[in-house]
Amino acid sequence: MNSESFSVGERLISGAYLRQGAQARRAHEQLIRVFIEQGKCPEDGWDESTIELFLNELAILDSNNFLGNCGVGEREGRVASGLVARRHYRLIHGIGRSGDIAAIQPKAAGVRSVTSCFVVPLATGMSLTLCFLTLRHERPKAKYIIWPRIDQKSCFKSMLTAGFEPVVIENVLEGDELRTDVKAVEAKILELGVENILCVHSTTSCFAPRVPDRIEELAVLCSKYSIPHIVNNAYGVQSSKCMHLIQQGSRLGRIDAFVQSLDKNFMVPVGGAIVAGFNDSFIEAISKMYPGRASASPSLDVLITLLSLGASGYKQLLKERKEMYGYLLIELRNLAEVYKERLLDTPHNPISLGMSLKNLEEQSGAAVTQLGSMLFTRQVSGARVVPRVSVQTVSGYTFTGFMSHSNHYPCSYLNAASAIGMKKLDVDLFIKRLDKCLRALKKQKNSGVNVSESENANCTTKLHMGELSERLQDVLPAETSEVLPSIETV
């Protein structure tokens, strides 16, 4: 309702009441006006009614939502399901035009994108592919991408999908950490020839014991040889250390673009990424490389999330993540000491931690993989158990020691990460369940009885009732579990 509607409404409703209502609406409108004027995330998060009012106002600007609209084209925002239309807040047309994802289209007002970054409705791997395809036009003779090894399939496939040949640079072991071999990168540049190299493809966020690449040194190297530099910063936005590496790399050398996942950094559904950089024209070229218009869902998801949290809310999440990293480090180190293992010393990795599994490895190779299965059946997700020797072929390329980022890492290990949104309860449950799994495997070793994982997993027919009781203690609130009778007595 606008001011005229409120004035007319006084014939039907008390003027005093309407004036209060008008004042309340102006409070919502003021928040929206300031947001549009400043063009940045509000310091304090909005309530849902303000967000819905804002989105509804945007949807009304879509020509297919105009009252009396008569559409005779093939793309008229027709949606068969009302549920689907409401799920997208009736913003049906998406973003961009058929030839430019960043363009303002005539049917929907859209949101003007800044030139130093844009949201693309692709996950990280395909967003990296988009960057490589853009570079093809600048370096038509190039066929190689130099890639310090990280055992993660999507970033590896992103290079192959773009039609380039990855040149894998093995990491070097420094203490427990796997670090970038900068000398090997430079040697490969000289061997292959600068004109034949599309770019260096480095990584910040990764699983311990691998640590972020030496971004600054690689950036200096790329500047020295005039070679583009693309950084996979998949979940690095949540880490001030990863972002500092990128900032320093740009200041000291060359970084053309860096790509980060929306779901990993902003807690939204999978399917979007932010492509950012320090060269406006190159970022604009990447956005124009995207063929056709695109779904507005990823942009809408992150917009709603940031408006809900506000800048202060997001900063608080980042602060909590750092605190949880410290808490996870202490708890995992304490548990490692109990089982005569050790926390891997990886101070350059600000998100992920690793714990050795040497004793399990000595027990048997199967015990290491069995631990991973046991954690999975106990609903522990995200933790990775990495055997010392495993071979895997990815799109025709064979990797020895796959998942360990090295051909010959000295030991098997388990890693876990403290990512944004993690709570103390998550750490406590993880440590408790990992403790039970390690205890069971230790008992198995001492008894000499080989208990198959299928027996551990089959709660219906083969699980001892006492163990089932213990699992219920894990998931039930303390006040509930205290008053339940022991299942063994039922």
Image: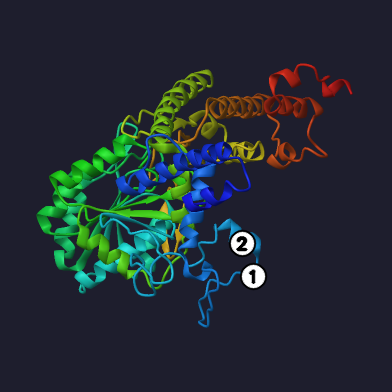
Please tell me which residue lies in front, 338 or 266: 266
Q: Secondary structure at mark 2?
A: helix
Whether residue 134 is situated above or below residue 16 in the rendered picture: below
Looking at numbered disc 1 in the image, what kind of residue is underneath it? Ala
In the figure, 137 relative to 302: above or below? below
Query: Number of numbered discs present?
Result: 2
What is the distance, in whole Å, between disc 1 and disc 2 at their CAs?
8 Å
**On the rendered structure, is 212 left or right of 319?**
left
Who's the residue at 26% across and 63% down the image? 284
Question: What residue occupies the far bottom of the structure in this picture?
Answer: 72
Circle 1 packing at 10 Å, graded few (<14), some (14-19), many (20+), is: few
Crowd band around label 2 with a 10 angstrom C-alpha radius: few (<14), some (14–19), many (20+): few
Asked whether disc 1 touches disc 2, contact meaning CB atoms under 8 Å apart, the reply is yes
Mark 1 — residue?
A: 80
Residue 46 in the image: state x and y as whole percent. 47, 39
- Between 408 and 480, the one nearer to me in the picture: 480
483 or 355: nearer the viewer: 483
- The residue that disc 2 covers is 84
Looking at the rendering, which quadrant does residue 240 occupy?
A: top left
Secondary structure found at label 1: loop
Using the rendered image of the protein, determine whether residue 164 is visible from the camera's viewpoint.
Answer: no
Question: For the point 74% across and 28% down, which residue is it?
Answer: 472
Is residue 108 in view?
Answer: yes
- What residue is at 41 percent from the left and 41 percent from the top? 207
User: What is the x, y in percent for residue 124?
Assistant: 40, 55
Q: What is the number of the mark on residue 108? A: none
Q: Amino acid at mark 2?
A: Val
